[in-house]
Image: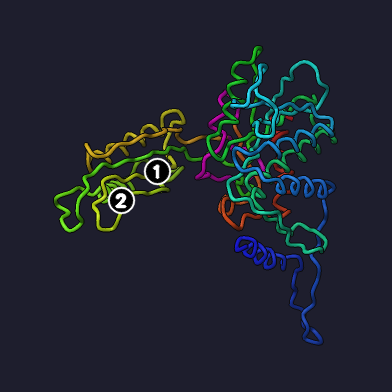
Amino acid sequence: MQVLTAQLLLASSLAQATVAWHEQIPLGGVPEILPVVDKALSYRDDLVSLHKSLVDIQSISFDESEVGQFLVDYLTERDFVVYKQFLPTSNKTASGPSEDDKARFNVVAWPGSRGPRPFPKVLVTSHIDTVPPFIPYLRSDHGRAINGETVIAGRGSVDAKASVAAQIIAVFELLEAEEIEREDDVMLLFVVGEERSGDGMRVFSDAVARRDPPLELRAAIFGEPTEGKLACGHKGFFDCEITVHGKAGHSGYPWLGKSANEVLMRALTKVLDTDLGSSEEYGNTTVNVGLLQGGVAPNVIPEKATSKIAGRVAIGPQDGGSQIVVDRLIDVLKSVDEEGIEYQCYTGYGVVKCECDVDGFETAVMNYGTDVANFRGTHTKYLYGPGSILVAHGPDEALKLKDMEDAVEGYKKLILHALGN
């Protein structure tokens, strides 16, 4: 209820942007209220409808099948060839994963007739899973005519269903204008699991690597919230689970025991105070202490303490950069207590570089991770999309309609650039 109230307050305040105020007091001293001049694009209704349908469907990671099926039906009805790429699952039949409600799958689609496998030049992709909790769809127009300043809220409204909707409409527009020379030059891919393990994109990447003859893409365009800027790259990632073993005892005699909590706190503080890797382009490597647990009672010296941390890597290379950072982190832990601290780390990847030299785009570097690193190959990588990451995982996730419409035009421009048209 608190989340919905916050959304309503946000939408109500931002809805005031639907009119422009001009101070004109030549006669009676009463300000004149002039409506915003808003030229609706031909695809506005389709974009809004598609985006609403996507956001209305709950699709928290590992429960994405309903939104995936919606996209299968939506694209099939519009004469796309669509197939489900199933992920490994415990629900298997003799011929592979069963198509029950919990089976997880990527959605792969391209325009044209069903026949020989396509050889697309450009892959346009984003993810259809979201973080929890589900937040219902909400618009700020309150029954008034929708316009570019209309605010649209809800879980996934930014990350990343705005990208999914804008990408689909962009491809539709290019096909209708006959700006794509060969129908299967462009392939759509909407993956599951990006918010957790990236398993959807890794399954697709593995399938591409095994394909014979190989799929030789020129480029892949990834949809994520970049505030409409073309990303030159993003930070890498690692995570670790740290366990400290101490010695329990009475809290009145701390010198007779060993506080696992105290050791863990000292270790984490030293980690946070250490430069684990920095660069001019990507800034500092940062560490988030996400989980802490230790002890059984206030008057008992804690025997065991654990923490889970996640790091954003600011150094390269993509393959190996995170290992450099993790090695430095381990050295810090050992300097605090070499015998009492255990650790298990997933080294992830270092900074990921993307192409951003395209006319007409502002550029930026992102601090978050994406599926760009999970799709292997020699293709050129573009990262772009509507909305801000700063609201993406919060209770006020929202964006303006004009941001999505700008993204449709941006995706069209990127697709044509990648195709060389």
What residue is shown at x 66% (from left), y 16% (from top)? 94
**SS at mark 2 in the image:** loop
Residue 197 at what x, y percent from top left? 53, 35
Q: Few, some or many C-alpha atoms within 10 Å of disc 1 (few <14, some 14-19, many ≥20)?
A: some
Residue 146 at what x, y percent from top left? 80, 58
**SS at mark 1 in the image:** strand
User: Closest to the observer: 105 or 236?
Assistant: 105
| Residue under numbered circle 2 | 295
Magenta segment boundaries in residue numbering: 355-380
**Which residue is situated farthest in the bottom direction here?**
28
User: Closest to the observer: 235 or 83?
Assistant: 83
Query: Does 18 sit above or below residue 86?
Result: below
Q: Is residue 366 magenta?
A: yes
Q: Is residue 163 left or right of residue 88?
A: right
Dominant SS in magenta: loop
User: Closest to the observer: 282 or 235?
Assistant: 235
Residue 318's disc number: none
Residue 85 at what x, y percent from top left? 67, 26
What residue is shown at x 45% (from left), y 38% (from top)? 237
**Which residue is situated farthest in the top direction here?**
212
Q: Few, some or many C-alpha atoms within 10 Å of disc 2 (few <14, some 14-19, many ≥20)?
A: some
Residue 222 at what x, y percent from top left? 63, 36
Amino acid tagged 2: Gly
Measure how far apart labels 1 and 2 are at the Cα level.
16 Å
Does the residue at mark 1 contact the one at mark 2 (Cβ under 8 Å)? no
Amino acid tagged 1: Lys
What residue is shown at x 65% (from left), y 12% (from top)? 212
Q: Quadrant of residue 337?
A: top left
What residue is shown at x 31% (from left), y 47% (from top)? 268
Q: Is residue 292 visible?
A: yes
| Residue under numbered circle 1 | 308
